[in-house]
Image (cartoon, helix red, strand yellow):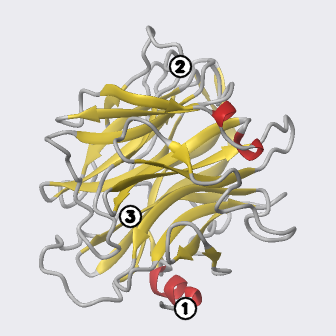
Amino acid sequence: MIDVHDLADSVRPTAKSGALVVAPTHRAGDWNSHGVDCPFVFRKDGALGMTVVGWDGRGYQTGLAWHDGAQWSAPQLVFPRDPASAHRRHNAALTSILRDTELYGAGELLPIDGWYYGTYHAYPDAGYEQGSAVIGFVRSRDLVEWEEVGDLLRPEDGGAWERGGLYKSYLLRHDDRFWLFYNAKDRATGRWIEQTGAAVSDDLASWHRVSDAPLLPVGTAGAPDDRFASDPFVLRAPDGTWLMFYFGLCAGGPAVDLLATSPDLIAWTKSPTVLVAPGEAGALDDWHAHKPAVIRTGDRLEHYYCAVQRLGAPVAIGGYSQPEMRGIALAWSPVVAAPMESVPVAPAAAG
């Protein structure tokens, strides 16, 4: 197995885009008016796509964007809130679709009997992440129309570390078993902590946790993830080592993207290397650089992330004062692997 430090160095981005690749509209009434968050990147029949979660001052909904070789399209709303649903009345944050997990693969979606399976989380109340969220499962034939399937994953059914609500989830398939990695928070009402665990399923319908404890707990005091170890995105290196790209938040500090490795998806070793950190004052990511989504394009490994810039003067949108610019940015590094003709060539750098 490759040393965790060497792996982190091989995937750590060396360049960043100078502009957001997907930004909020700042138009009152749009589903993505206030912010764009939680990128998930993939390919479908060779086309590079990305889902993003939009915030409109009431709750989350999800859109789909495509890359044309030069830039990303404006995302189309594909997973809206559902007034008839007890848990999706206010929020519908689709965060993963079953895809190829090879680090240097193409990231193609993996349909099952013609269906694409995805995962989402939803908070029960209106407002910014109000109430204890659940994780649900959906499927689609076209990535536009989605139907719910299987059981919900609920915080009250898990360990004490997740009783405050479930957050971003990531679905993968390995050895004919489905794995769902997700972060969750404890019940603390003030400075809660977020950690990452997993559940498994043989049929995409019923799920059980692999442990009552988190698989990726927060770090010790002073570590970059001593408060949050969140938003897993799991891929596999050529030697079989599993890589969990995730973000850490330390008490009083910024959010940064980090890496942990595992031989078996259960035991994880953290690297001290920070993959993506906030930029200088005035940069598009001067407050937070977090929530990773990784895919290979040609001779580079692309690392999409949520960039948050602190605004000097808040933007007023529909009566809501927005103190930040929150959108999707891109960082990348050279691929440390043999060339693969099946992977599309890299587009021109954004920004």
Whether residue 318 is situated above or below residue 276 in the rendered picture: above
Q: Which residue is mark 1?
A: 3
Q: Quadrant of the C terminus?
A: bottom left
Residue at mark 2 to residue at mark 1: CA–CA distance: 43 Å
User: Which amino acid is tagged 2?
Assistant: His
Dot in front, 1 or 3: 1
Q: Earlier in the sequence, mark 1 or mark 3?
A: 1
Q: Is residue 190 visible?
A: yes
Q: Quadrant of residue 319?
A: top right
Residue 114 locus on image (x, y percent): 14, 41
Whether residue 211 is situated above or below residue 271 in the rendered picture: above
Residue at mark 1 to residue at mark 3: CA–CA distance: 34 Å
Q: Which residue is mark 3?
A: 351
Residue 97 locus on image (x, y percent): 33, 47
* Mark 1 secondary-structure assignment: loop
* Mark 3 secondary-structure assignment: loop
Q: Quadrant of residue 147?
A: top left
Residue placed most toward the observer, 88 or 173: 173
Residue 29 locus on image (x, y percent): 46, 18
